[in-house]
Image: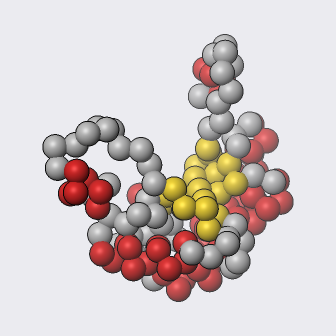
Amino acid sequence: MLQAADSLPVNIGLLGKGNGSNPDALREQVAAGVIGLKIHEDWGATPAAIDCALTVADEMDVQVALHSDTLNESGFVEDTLAAIGGRTIHTFHTEGAAAAMRRILLPPARTPIFCPRQPTRRCPIPSTPLTNIWIC
C-alpha cells in the first residue's frame, strides 16, 4: 500500500494492523512507514493487543486507533480502560451503534485521553436520517 501511494501527489497516511501481542511485528510496520496502528474488534480488540499497541506507539511516537470490542468478547469496558492505562487513544465509532456501546464508550470519551471519532456516512442524505444516526 505504501509503495502504491508513492506516486500520488497528495499526503497519505496509512494505519498498520495493531492487533497483536508481538511488539516486534508492530515495530516493523512503523519502521516500514505507517503513521499509526489500528486495533479492530473483528481481529481481536483484546486488552493484551491494546496494551501492546499503545506500548509500541509510545515508544515510536505514533497514534493508536481503536474500534473496541462492542460484544464484550474479550472483556468489559473496565478491562479496556485498564489496558489503555491512561494513555492517549483515538476511538472509532464513539457515537455508539447500540445502547450498550453508547454506555461503554461515551463516559470514557469525556476524559482528556480519548480522541473520539465518528466516521462519515456513505450516504449524506439518508432515507431515514434518525435511524442512520444510531446505526453504523
The answer to whether residue 86 is left or right of residue 48 is right
Q: Tell which of 2 and 121 is nearer to you.
A: 121
Residue 19 seen in the figure: no
The percent coordinates of residue 12 (x first, y second) are 65, 30
User: Is 52 rendered above or below residue 75?
Assistant: above
Residue 123 seen in the figure: yes
The percent coordinates of residue 117 (x first, y second) are 51, 56
- Residue located 47% across and 74% down the image: 106
The answer to whether residue 59 is left or right of residue 26 is right
Q: Extreme left residue here?
A: 127
Residue 82 in which image quadrant? bottom right
Q: Tell which of 3 and 10 is nearer to you.
A: 10
- Residue located 76% across and 60% down the image: 56
- Picture quarter with the C terminus: bottom left
User: Is 93 rendered above or below residue 75?
Assistant: above
- Residue located 65% across and 36% down the image: 13
Residue 86 in which image quadrant? bottom right
